[in-house]
Image: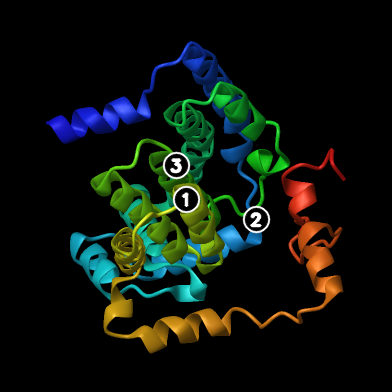
Amino acid sequence: MTAIQNLLSNLWPGGRGRWAVVFVVAAYFFVLEPVFLHSSRVPDELWYLQLAQEKLPNQTVGELFGAIMSETNRLGYGALYWNLYSSMVFLDGKDALFGMRLMCLCMMAFVGWLISVAGVRRQSSFAELAAFLWFTLPVAWWSGKVTGPEVLSVVLAVAGAAILSGASNYRWDATAFGFIGLSIGVKFNAAPIAIFAFILWRPHTVKAAAGALAALAAGFAAANPFVLWNPGGYLAAVASMSQPPKLTWAFVGEIFSNSNWEWDGVLSGGLLQWSLPFLG
């Protein structure tokens, strides 16, 4: 009971501006709800839905159990993502895509709240302002393949950073790095977040750093249990879906800014387009 109370107190921190954050989060949810639940579908969403439905043609408990136990990182995405989608197919059937969209909308809104939690835990006077800033960024209004693994990966990473922002405590530090490990396990390109977390945390002993790395590994394995007995299969799936970049200045420039449009009509963009475009 004490652990649950501690968790709730961490998710509902004090602060004069928390009700303003609640209002903004709720407003964001209701403004975006018609967009997320619109009947139009991005091609990749249909693909992911089909892949999730393939393992549960009859939506039985046995099929769900079998899907979870045999799941791999198909398309390079973590087994946790596919297990979540399989569970949605089991619950909602043909409406699983809209169930996933609603869940992803909740996670997108929750990111803003978690940012305010991180600010309060760091005793920052800009906690609410930081949360409001999230809702001004173009990435918060992204409407591409919203049922893909990206949203799940982001909310897990931000949850880890929020927990890590408070006073250092072995149990909570391990939990934070476990969340970040889950984020990386869902989509491997979240790996740089671990570097940010170590900079934020600044371990003072080798033992503490080793514990954080162990928690990262545990979180990663929890998102992809099969990696414990088939690491080669995991790496093969990742390699099949990506190509080593050509490390040139032009490539680095594209990371920060580009106007490339993908095959399904979604802007690729760089960090300046999706984070702080006014600087550009």
Is 111 or 250 nearer to us in this picture? 250
- Do tag 2 and tag 1 residues touch (Cβ < 8 Å)? no
Which residue is the site of mark 2?
Answer: 42
Disc on the earlier residue, 2 or 1: 2
Relative to 228, does residue 131 appear above or below in the rendering?
A: above
Q: Residues within 10 Å of mark 1 (few under 14, many from 20)?
A: many
The mark that comes first in sequence, 2 or 3, is 2
Q: Residue at x 82, y 65 (%)?
A: 254
Residue at 48%, 10% in the rendered image: 16
Amino acid marked by disc 3: Met
Q: Nearer the viewer, residue 6 or 183?
A: 6
Name the element at disc 3.
helix
Per the model, the C-alpha gap separating discs 1 and 3 is 17 Å
Q: Identify which residue, 210 or 18, lies in the foreground.
A: 210
Report crowding for label 2: few under 14, some 14 to 19, many 20 or more residues within 10 A (C-alpha).
some
The mark lying in front, picked from 2 and 1, is 1
In this rendering, which labeled residue sits more in front, label 1 or label 3?
1
Residue 57 position within the rendered picture, expressed as x and y whole percent measured from the top left: 34, 66
The picture places residue 36, in percent across and down from the top left corner, at: 59, 39
Which residue bears the numbered disc 1?
157
Which amino acid lies under the numbered mark 2 shown in the image of this protein? Answer: Val
Q: Is residue 170 visible?
A: yes
Question: Which one is closest to the eye, mark 2 or mark 3?
Answer: 3
Which amino acid type is shown beneath numbered disc 1?
Answer: Ala
The answer for how far apart the CA atoms under marks 2 and 1 are is 25 Å
Please tell me in which quadrant of the rendered image residue 167 appears.
top left
Q: SS at mark 2? A: loop
Q: Which residue is drawn at the image coordinates 33% and 73% (left, top)? A: 71
Mark 3 surroundings within 10 Å by alpha-carbon count, few (fewer than 14), some (14 through 19), many (20 or more): some
x and y percent of residue 235 in the render?
46, 83
Q: Secondary structure at mark 1?
A: helix
Residue at which label 3 appears: 103
